[in-house]
Amino acid sequence: MTAVIALMGGGAFTANDDIARTLLEGRSGRVLVVPTADAFEEPHLLVEAAVAWGERVGVATSPLMALTRPDARRDDYVAMANDADAVWLVGDSPIHLRTVMKNTPLWAALCAVVDRGGLLVGVGGSAAAMCDPMTDPRGGAFTIGLGLVDAMAVVTETENWSPEQLVRTRQLAGDATFVEMHLRGDAHRHGADPPWCERRPSLGDGRRGCRPRRLAVTSSR
C-alpha cells in the first residue's frame, strides 16, 4: 500500500472517526498508540480511549508507553514499532514528544513504518512535533521539530488559541508553508509518493525528507 503521513488537528480517539476509517482502509493488524506527548498528563486515559475508538472503527490497538527518553532506547519498544503497520502519535505536548524521540532508535523505527508503506498519524500537538519547523504552543513561535515532514508547520486545535497568538504565529510564518487545523473535522494528509510529496534521500537522523507539493484537507463533515 501507499505510505501515508497524516496530520490531524486534534480530538484523538474522540473525533474524526470517519477520517480514521478512510486512513485505515485496506490495512490489517493492530494500531500502535504512542501517547508520549501526554506523559505529564494522564496518558493511560488516551490508551483507554483508544480501545473504545478501536471498537468503533473496527481495529485493535496496542499501547507503546514510551514516556521518557530512556524509553525511546528500549529494545522491546523498538521491536513493537518495527512490527507496526499503523501508528497513532497522540498527546498535547510537542516539546516533550520531540525531547523524548529526537535522534533515538525508537523514532527511527517509527519513521521506518512509512518506508514500509505504513500509516503514521499525528494528532494535535503530536502532529506539530512531526514537522520542522515545529510550532511551540506556549507562545506560537517556531522551533526545531522532529522533521518527518519538513518545510511545513502546523498549528493544531486552533479553537483553543487566542486571537493574539494566532496573529503572532501568522506574522512569524511569513511566506512559509503553514497550516491551521481545527479540533474536529479536518486533517492534513501527506502521502509518501507523488502527488503528495517529493521523496528525497534519508537525512540520516530518523528524518525521511518529504517535502509537500500540495496540501489536502479531508473533512468528516
Image (cartoon, grey):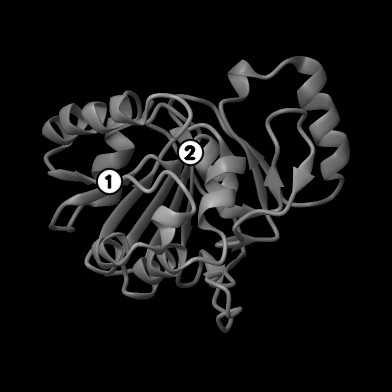
Pointers 2 and 1 in contact (C-beta within 8 Å): no
Picture coordinates of residue 2 (x, y %)? 33, 69
Which image quadrant: the C terminus?
top left
Q: Position of residue 73 (x, y in %)?
A: 41, 63
Asked if residue 215 can be seen in this view, the reply is: no
In the displayed structure, 42 sits above or below 187; it is: above
Amino acid type indicated by mark 1: Thr
- Between residue 72 and residue 137, name the one nearer to us: 72
How much space separates mark 2 and mark 1, taking CA atoms? 25 Å
Q: Residues within 10 Å of mark 1 (few under 14, many from 20)?
A: few
Pick out the residue farthest to the front. 70
Q: Quadrant of residue 201?
A: bottom right
Amino acid carrying mark 2 in the image: Ala
**Quick check: 55 left or right of 212?**
left
The answer to whether residue 75 is seen in the rendering is: yes
Depth order, front residue of 73/85:
73
The structure residue drawn at horizontal position 33% and vertical position 58%, both measured from the top left corner, is 119
Nearer mark to the viewer, of 2 and 1: 2
User: Which of the numbered marks, if any, corresponds to residue 81?
Assistant: none
Q: Is residue 191 above or below residue 178?
A: below
SS assignment at label 2: helix
Against 48, residue 21 (above or below) is: below
Percent from the top left, x then y, of residue 142? 77, 44
Q: Which residue is mark 1?
A: 22
Secondary structure beneath label 1: helix
Q: Residue at x 42, y 34 (%)?
A: 219
Q: Residue at x 71, y 53 (%)?
A: 133
Question: Between disc 2 and disc 1, whose residue precedes?
Answer: 1
Q: Which residue is mark 2?
A: 37
Residue in the foreground of this view, choosing between 64 and 177: 64
Quarter of the figure with residue 80: bottom left
Q: Quadrant of residue 83?
A: bottom left
